[in-house]
Amino acid sequence: MKKRLFAMVLAVMMAVSMMATTAFAVEPEEESAGEKKLYSMTLDIDPLANGGSRSAYADTVTLSMPGYSNDWSLNKPNVDFTTLPSNAVVETVEIYPGRLSAGSSTTSPITTTKYALTSPWGHRIERAFKDTGETMSFYGEYAKGMWTFQIYGTNVGPTYGTVKCTSSRVVIWYTLE
């Protein structure tokens, strides 16, 4: 009986000590004079388009075009950063364009060569397509608003072709003015 009581007391003490540690870990650090706090917000384009916790107003990025042509995707998924504070100013933007998949085996292949991200203020940055992601410079712009993502490709065959870009993700690092 004494061993069981001792074990229960130890378990309660351990639980209490973990709660205190957790609470301590969440406390904000004191700011040095003049230093800015850096925040981030990440949005996955696909889950948002399909009714996730926040809303975006487009589906997966799709690029469809006739044979031997090149163009930008016509559907432009909006990445909804309207929940950010109005005084949020961009430090950096990271974009992970996602995975590409062909429309079907009977259509012409499309090579995707670049992607673009456009800020709510109309600033557009284009980059060569790579799966690993990249940091883009939108430094100093206000972060709040709808950001737009597009892909660019070339249909290398004679028939109509389609390619989809899924699991795209945008991370905005910002400070508050």
Image (cartoon, rainbow, N blue to C red):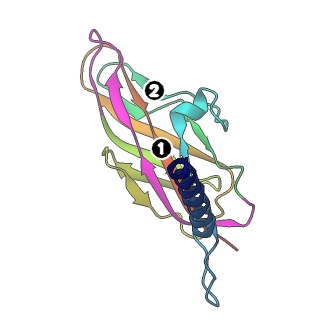
Q: Residue 91, can we see it? A: yes
The amino acid type of the residue labelled 2 equals Thr
Q: Does 176 appear above or below 124?
A: below
Which of disc 2 and disc 1 is earlier in sequence? 2
Residue at the far top in the pictured view: 106
Taking the spot 41% from the left edge, 33% from the top edge, the residue there is: 71
Taking the spot 64% from the left edge, 91% from the top edge, the residue there is: 33
Taking the spot 44% from the left edge, 50% from the top edge, the residue there is: 95
Left or right, residue 173 beside residue 107: right
Q: Residue 123, can we see it? A: no
Residue bounds of the magenta highlight: 85-111
Residue highlighted by disc 1:
169
How far apart are the two marked residues, 1 and 2, measured between alpha carbons?
A: 15 Å
Taking the spot 65% from the left edge, 32% from the top edge, the residue there is: 57
> Badge 1 local density, few (<14 within 10 Å), some, or many (20+)?
some
Identify which residue, 124 or 94, lies in the foreground: 94
Identify which residue, 157 or 93, lies in the foreground: 93
Residue at the far bottom in the pictured view: 33
Query: From the image, which quarter does the C terminus lie in?
Result: bottom right
Residue 27 occupies quadrant: bottom right
Residue 118 drawn at (x, y percent): 55, 50
Residue 130 drawn at (x, y percent): 30, 46
The amino acid type of the residue labelled 1 equals Arg
Residue 24 drawn at (x, y percent): 61, 69
| Residue 62 tag number | 2
> Badge 2 local density, few (<14 within 10 Å), some, or many (20+)?
many
Residue 100 drawn at (x, y percent): 34, 30
Identify which residue, 10 or 34, lies in the foreground: 10
Q: Is residue 92 magenta?
A: yes
| Residue 17 tag number | none
Left or right, residue 69 beside residue 85: left
